Image: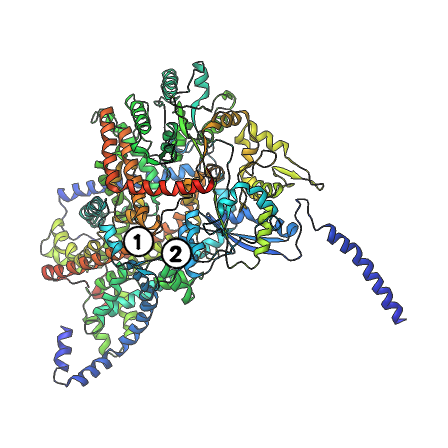
Amino acid sequence: MRRYYKETHGTKAFDVFNVVLMFLFMLSIIFPFWNQLCVSFSDVSTYPVSNITVLPLGFNTEAYQKVFSDQRILRVSLVSVMRVIFGTTGTLLCTGLLAYITTIEWFSGRKFLRRAFLLTMYFSAGLIPTYLAFISIGLYNTFCVYIIPGLFSAYYMLIIASYISNMPTALFEAARIDGAAELKIYFRVVLPISIPVFAAIAVYCAVDQWNSWFDTTIYAPNGQWDTLQIYLRRVLLEIEALSMIEDSSKALSKFKTLTPQSIRAATTIIVTLPIVCVYPFLQKYFLTGITIGAVKE
Amino acid sequence: MKRTLALVLTVLMLLCLVPAMAEGTEGKVNMFGWEIPDETIKFTAYMGNDNPDTVAKYAAQMHDYLVDNFNVDITLLVYDNDATERLGMMAASNEYPDVVLCSIANAAPWIEQGRAVDLTDLVNEENTPNIVKRYGKYLPRLYDDNGRLMCLANSWGMSQWADYAPQVRYDWYVEIGEPDVSTPEAYYEAVKQMIANHPENASGEKTYAFGGYKDSSYSVMRTWLSMWGIKKFWSYDEENNMTYWPFTDEAMEMVKFLNQVNRDGLLDPDIFSMTSQEFGDRVTNERYAAFVGNWWICGTYGHEKWNGIYGDAYTENMRYYHVNVAPEGITPTYNFKNTNGSRAIITDHATDVNGILKWFDFENTDKGTRLVGYGLPNEEGSVWNVYEDGSWEYTPEKVAQITTDTSTFDWEAVQMLGGQALYVMSAGVEPLEDGTYYWYDQSNVDKWKTIKDTLLRPTFYDSGAFDLIVLPTDSLLPATKTSCEDIAMTALANAIYASTEEEAIAIMEQCRDELTDAGIDELAAYYTEQYKAIAEKWGL
Amino acid sequence: MDTNKTVTAVGNHPRSSRLRRRLRRERELWILSAFILVWLAVICYYPMYGLIIAFKYYVPGKPFFTAKWVGLKYFSQFINGRDFPIVMRNTLAISGLNILFGFPAPILLALLLNELKNKHYKSVVQTVSYLPHFISWVVAASLLFSILNSEGFLNKILVRAGIIEAPINWLSKGEYFWGILTTANIWKGVGFSSIIYLSAIAGIDEELYQAGAVDGLNRTGSIWHITLPGIRTTVVLLGILQIGSILNAGFQQQLLLGTTQTRKYYEVIDTYAYKYGVQNNNYSYGTAVGLMKGVISVTLVLLANRISKKVMDIAVL
């Protein structure tokens, strides 16, 4: 961001402090990732995982070879990418439109719409009724079950609407007087000036879509629409399911073929990296402020 | 001319058919003693909560083998979500497979809602001779109060190996001359001596007498309580009146014992916050002189790992050795045996009930039980081989691996052949005719396991009657049970780590008041009443 | 201002024609809304018939409507439960700490990030800061264990520095649990939550800063008078929504970080409802607790909205 105020000793000292503080903060975050990376490159069948801190023990790349040798990984990755692309686009366009409609002050349905959506944030129907509903609508075991239920989100609606309502209404009215249809105003006027908030929501949506796994287990369990995330979850949840088994022999046999921690760590890294790259890509939209004046011209 | 040609052709065709037919009748029984049906027996079975990816991977080869050699097409279904939840969803949507395997509690609503096929007239000497023979005295236990048989059992019966045991680090124990450890006091004395010899591990970390980990069934604490004769957190008098463990003197002794260990600085402070894997890492790092609990966890993280880490410096005595410890005048109850197993329901969606029963009956023959337990024979990596004449044997090379150094045994290979009980639906853990089981590792035991199983044999008991009790879901009892468990375990954890014995006792006394307040009396009364009824029915 | 114009314009006409005019004007919007409303009805509201089982004894597999009515049985079972006071205390305490520290943390981070001069450093910090969001609680919990256990990193440092004499078992002492959990929550969520504030800051018209500098605003002054007012609506909106989720104090982190010894400090409504509802196979109980939470949340949100309207003239709903 450009600085318009006057630099003093105080502001310079603060800059140094800020840089150092952020550095420490980053350190606290990078350490766990580094640790996971080390685990993923270690020989965990020999060395106890808790002994691995900042360097791998018994360095090898077996874990990665094993994960990538699984034929399914390509297919599940593809489903994940499709989820992110279609899910994010769908949610942004639909929820954005909804948000815009609810900011039009002379529209008599705006309060009703907002409140009807607000309720959905706090009341959910529960697992079984939703499951039955999805079966009867025909969403069960389809790719659409990832997209359609998420098209409109009350939370994002409120955020986008609060952003749009900060914009001068004159912008929209001018287009309206020119006889533009609402949809056209939405695409031509609202979207361009709201790029920062749409970028932020895009990050949230993309990450949500990428990270989702629960809906696969409930609404698309036939394996056809497995995502990369459910693939990872299964590897991570194995260990939790293990503590529920009371039969000692059964537990032993499960334990013996438990996914090694190095593969768990490798899968975590593989699943996290792609989505982490989405952010820097969208980040440029927050780096400099926009000038509303420019849009008007 | 035409007629002759037709005749010749007919004769030729007939000639071709004869050997085919002969082969057909001859091949009807395969080398497992299975009579191959003309029509494919096809069914789907819900096996519970598991990882669908791995189950699909492990089930594939066995599935194809059964189709080719048995004309049986079984599809195993597992889901990521909790079994209770998935069963609820299945029942609600009326979409479920032909066979459902589930816990006793989860089976109850299915039977009540009429989703289970009534097997009363189908399971008998004539129709399913092997089930009748092999289930033996456990079959009558499956009939409900109206004398109907609505389900079969899975993994039922009394196994003859010890799952839980007190253990000592054997080479350290040998060092001090293998003193007597038959009472808790002697056991602790020996452990203290071992710690005195090994106060630190190689990296200078302090060693402890005992460790443990958190898990949903509190198996470590349950095993500690069973040293004082408590059965699955309940104590029984001669008339089978049940008392919850905090109200017993034995449990108080156990609390005092562990509290003493803690005050001596020899109890790992992190028992209740460690996961089993974190605990295992400490075992590998040689942090414990002894352990009370699951038999295999210290083996997996102990000698099997040390073997790889220390190489030539590893000696056979570097391992955990199982001992039997009992306070004077008390029979310890380390090993509960849930003889009910879990439930196998044939649902009303099944189209071929007789076919499924035929398969279940085969599963209960010796060879059938082995097939579903050990996985495919005669393949590379198979742990057993079956020959055309019907005889069979364990693969010698595999036996050598599992009995000398289990770390070299390839568990994954066995699972890839459908082994480790992946396909078990109605078989039991009772010993087969030759004394082996469908668990491969329990059928071929080394001397250490033999010592464990012989030594701990007197600590086995049938917990079936208790495990059969299902608390009615429309009453407050399940909630009472949950709160009582919470109260008691919290008190136990805090009492063990109390800084004085008086404080520990005070915590337990307060816990008793809280339990009474939470309704433990009603819970105990319900359990006692049910237990007595079942015991009477079973003639225990 | 726009609304006023509309009202005066239609003010002279009779009622019916006013309505007709209004509908004609809003026709386009209603058509768009119709699609949205159909979605809302089918996906969100139609399955809500299932909430009826909060008042019934429901066993999955039996029809919802024929289940036995039990009235408020499950509500009273929850409220009269032995541990209810403790559970409420923990929920409110953990949520309270989350609001007190967890809510301002991303705002602060966004402001600090915005003050970084070097564009590249800023974008690196930003990217890194959102990483913990991707670490599952299972992994985070095992890392926390390695820091906080009786011989962990923290104890080693504190003992060596002479701050404590003997190691403290942080995870088994209830009094530390809330602090540990809040810190972990902030660490995990702060970067990810700050994205929205960064986008709000990005939306502030740059001309305002120029004008501010002309008026002689210094650094703190421009943060205080331009940046903060610029993101005010976003802050208030998220604040109100956060108040609505005061009864959601977490679930997985409690189960993973909590121990038997700290149960009286970690048990919150969601873990409690899970234990007594789902694990006891009692759907009705779980639904009743969920319904109750929903009613309380909506009430709180509407209340907070009203207050913000009165005090700050920002109504977000």
Report whether C70 appears left or right of B103: left
- x and y percent of residue C223 in the render? 15, 52
| Residue in front for this viewpoint, B8 or A121 | B8
* Crowding near the residue tagged with mark 2, few <14, some 14–19, many ≥20 C-alpha atoms within 10 Å: few
Q: Secondary structure at mark 1?
A: helix
What is the residue that sits farthest to the top in this orientation? B177
Residue A53 appears in the picture as rendered: no
Q: Eyeballing the image, is C274 above or below B266?
A: below
The amino acid sitting under disc 2 is Asp
Give me the residue at 25% from left, 24% from top.
Answer: B501
Q: Position of residue C98 (x, y in %)?
A: 21, 47
| Mark 1 residue type | Gly
Q: Is residue A202 visible?
A: yes
Q: Please tell me which residue lies in front, B139 or B458.
A: B139
Q: Would residue B90 appear left or right of C183 to someone viewing this image?
A: right
Q: Chain of mark 2?
A: A
Q: Which residue is mark 2?
A: A215
B400 relative position to B517: left or right: right
Q: Which residue is mark 1?
A: C286
**Where on the picture, by quarter, is residue A155?**
bottom left
